[in-house]
Amino acid sequence: MCATNMTDPKRPRRQKRQGIVILRHGVAVHNVPDARTKQCPDHFDPRFTDPPLIPQGTQQASQIALKIQQFLAAIGRTDVDLVICSPLRRCLQTASLAFPPQQKTSSRVAVAATTPPVVPAEPSEPGNRRPRILVNELVREACGLHYPDKRRDRSNIAAEFPWVQLPEDFAAVDPYWRPDARETLPQLKGRIVAFFQWLASNVQEELLGIVSHGVWIESCLMHFCPAVLENGKKRVYNCDAFKAICVSTWEQGNDNEWNLVSVGLEECELVGQAT
């Protein structure tokens, strides 16, 4: 199933609507200027390959977890059904804190706004975690040249995050990052559209978390719902959380198969920020 512009107004149509919470990762090592020189880290330095969160970043992820819980409680939910996450370490750390494993009770919702939620221990197997965290290369940052956007090997990711689900076709080494070229914004936007086509076609869950990066999220929102960023006047900061509805339109073909006609985001809104 793929999106197409060849439509017939006489054919039956239907819509699929999926709620999403889009979250940028917390502050990581490469986001912090040097305390002495005030210079930003050199993103061309291999020492900054796939950097982790700093303590401020983990605190941000815990803060936004509570705000996400408050948003979910307002719509009658306690958790999302699935979290789709970039394979980079800072996003996997953020996803694990911002969408913690379900507890037997929903006590996190009632916690005071100034108190970070209690995060239960992570399970040892991806299938035992609810909500499940599924890695998808399509939601990673603009790729190439900058070492913070180069992911580690599959074995390293699996060892550090055993509760995260890696797809069967997830490559042993990073197949996308290049030292001599960086993904352009048009290429990134094409990847973002491809991601939402994949989401509409392959994911049945109704409420999702997406944990990604600043350039990816800004490009996504500017493409689908630019008003939420005041047409580019606003930026997406670490651990900003947005809610939206992913709306896909399907048309029935001659073989009675439903074909994806279009996909987009509606009702985009900022629902929480960390300090």
Image (spheres, rainbow, N blue to C red):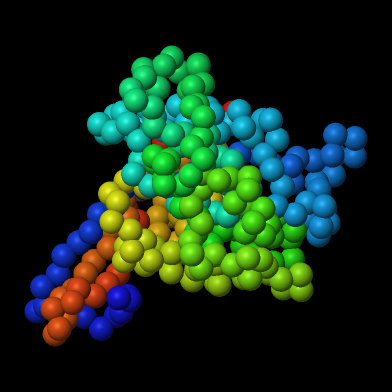
Residue furthest to the front in view is: 124
Q: In which quarter of the image is the C terminus?
A: top right
Q: Which residue is drawn at 63% across and 48% down?
A: 159
Task: Give residue 45's position: percent from left, percent from top.
Answer: 83, 56
| Residue 21 or residue 208, whichever sits in front | 208
Q: Residue at x 81, y 57 (%)?
A: 46
In this image, 62 relative to 35: left or right?
left
Task: Give residue 175's position: percent from left, percent from top.
Answer: 63, 71
Q: In which quarter of the image is the N terminus?
A: bottom left
In this image, 273 relative to 29: left or right?
left
The reply to whether residue 7 is visible in this rendering is: yes
Above or below, 266 relative to 262: above
| Residue 234 or residue 81, whichever sits in front | 81
Above or below, 4 relative to 91: below
Task: Give residue 191's position: percent from left, percent from top.
Answer: 50, 68
Q: Toward which corner of the image does residue 179 lie, by quadrant? A: bottom right
The reply to whether residue 98 is visible in this rendering is: no
* Total residue callouts: 0
| Residue 226 or residue 55, whichever sits in front | 55
Above or below, 213 relative to 242: below
Task: Give residue 269's position: percent from left, percent from top.
Answer: 39, 43
Q: Residue at x 9, y 79 (%)?
A: 10
Q: Toward which corner of the image does residue 178 lie, by quadrant? A: bottom right
Q: Which residue is drawn at 50% across and 26% down?
A: 119
